[in-house]
Image: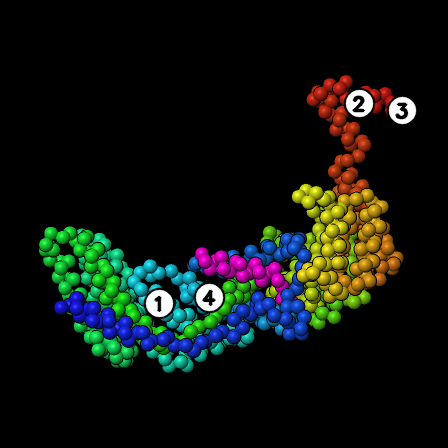
Amino acid sequence: MLKHQLKNTASRILHYLQDFTPREDLYALEESEACLNRGKAADGGERFVLSNPEAFHDLGIGTVLNAVFTAVPRPYEKSRVSDREYIESLFHHPAGDKEEIGKRQETIFELQNSEALWRQVLAVKSSLDTCLYDERYRSAVNGLKSLQDAANIMEFVSSIRKMQKPLSRRLKRIKDLGDRFDADTKFGEAERFLRDIYVPYGVGDAIDDNMDYLTSLSAVGSRREFYKRNRILLEATEKMLTEDPYAQFLNDEAGAVNLLATMKAKLDIWHKEIFSFNLAGITLETWGKNERKRYGDLMEYWLLLVNEAVYSRIPQLAIGDLSAELSFYLGAAALQRKWKADGFAVTLPVLLDKRAIRASVTNARNTSLMERLQADHIVGNDILSDRDHNLFVITGPNNGGKTTYLRQVGQMYWLAHLGMALPADQAELSLIDAIFTSFNTEDNTAEGTGLYLTELKRIARFSRPAAGQPRMTPYSVVFFDEFANGTDHEESVKRTKIVLEYLSQKGVTAYFTTHKHEIADMVEAGRLPGAANLGAEVRQSESGMETTFRILRNAKEKSYGHIQAEAMGITPDALQSYLREEIAQRLYPVEDTRMECREESSP
């Protein structure tokens, strides 16, 4: 009789659900793919700042990327992978759209300055990650995963509800989405069921656990747990079907099939059987495995009705890349807060029109050094350029800070176009369309090219790009570190002048380190329009030469090679003295050297 009743119940439910369709209206997040939108910028230009493949590594941008990524905790491995891919793509494609950069700036700045809001937005991201990556009940009874997904959506909306009212546009759109759910009466009904019955009764775990218990019923503990969880399911079902305001939550079909009475009757028989110890010679394990299918069918019928009730009230949701997007904002805000806590000045750059061709950054710091050194151990340097002076030749001794300064300038441009604050006292920067770098590299053995030929190929690629490659314009910024060192001095000077004259004519903002005095002399003589010398400061003391790591304007390198050599003991007298000491220590016989010949030939 009961078996016939269950089959009849299943038939009527499935017949009813054939005509059921979930709620079809869509709640879509505004700008669901905001940061990585591939469209054109508001002014019709490129949406992203372009660069050559080596620029990201040359300028040390990866250090900031890693710091932003690791600043945000993630409970799911899939979230880590997805966020990493998103942040890497975002960092490799700095924004070229002033409006987009402004939206990022205000979002990160607001999160940086409010730890409470930062934690609230992290909770939103965490609950959204649960919606996206929660694997619970994936292999359990059909319909259980769907119901858990609905509960996860409820938690996501609840986390938005707990957010304080933000000011930034990118966070306000999330709050607006939450307000839309709050005003939705049907969603409120589903949320009430999930909040008051599904979650507190632990319905998901009860159904999932009982499917496991039916495979190990020989243990008394398993039988007791099976009984306990069934009581929970009955109590939840009774509350759902008989108490206000839930009595009308399920459709009338649930009452027609007398769902509660069916569950009570079937569960009563199961409970008597598992505790009677009289199964006509059938082991409990065998009985449990046989009944597992029937129990699963009963739970599946229950879930079909409940899912129909829930998903007829929950709208569809489209949130795009919101989780990964929030990961960037949260990570950038956390990093900027850390910079400030470590004693560094942090400022939002003012972005100017690209045709202004201007930069004014005071006391900027190299972010790579900031990861390793304390604030009082890092020398800040200014960045000043305009239409009249935007081609800079930087000279100075080795290890004097030239390449560090080059990277620092590049980092300021790159981070500003990501929408991040800069480690500086104040900053104004024109928008740019591309960043190019040519730093010293090893010979390219894979292509069979030496250092100089590799550099020439790079210059050719910058000046005559192939289709689809970034083009150098007056609104680009270029960085050259020790160009043309892989050839003889005369050719190196000649080719350097040719490249600099080309950059000068084009009006490109460029930074160029070199040890070639002829180039600095050409700039000093005014033979290169738009150019200015920058010099790494050196102080001489009784102990020798001291580098300060300050970059001075209208300064050029003197010849410091002899001072460095003398400080290292590379002089004729010093080397002769070392040789005599080794012979005196009998490390090797004097006749095996040319020492005697040298002394005999000396006057």
- Residue 396, compared with residue 44, is above or below; it is above
Identify the amino acid type marked 4.
Lys
Spatial CA span between label 4 and label 2:
75 Å
**Which numbered marker is on residue 471?**
none
Quarter placement of the N terminus? bottom left
Q: Which residue carries the number 1 mark?
A: 146
Crowd rating for badge 3 (residues with CA inside 10 Å; few <14, some 14–19, many 20+): few
Foreground residue among 177 and 290: 290
Q: Who's the residue at 74% across and 38% down the image?
A: 568
Q: Amino acid at mark 3?
A: Pro
Q: Secondary structure at mark 4?
A: helix
Do the residues bearing badges 1 and 4 touch, measured as CB atoms within 8 Å? no
Question: What residue does disc 4 label?
Answer: 125
Identify residue type, mark 1: Ser
Residue for point 36% across, 74% down = 311
Circle 2 packing at 10 Å, graded few (<14), some (14-19), many (20+), is: some
The span from disc 1 to disc 3 (Cα, nearest Å) is 99 Å
Boundaries of the magenta span:
77-96
Q: Secondary structure at mark 2?
A: helix
Residue mark closest to the camera, 2 vs 3: 2
Based on the picture, tell me whether residue 78 belongs to the magenta stretch. Answer: yes
SS at circle 1:
helix
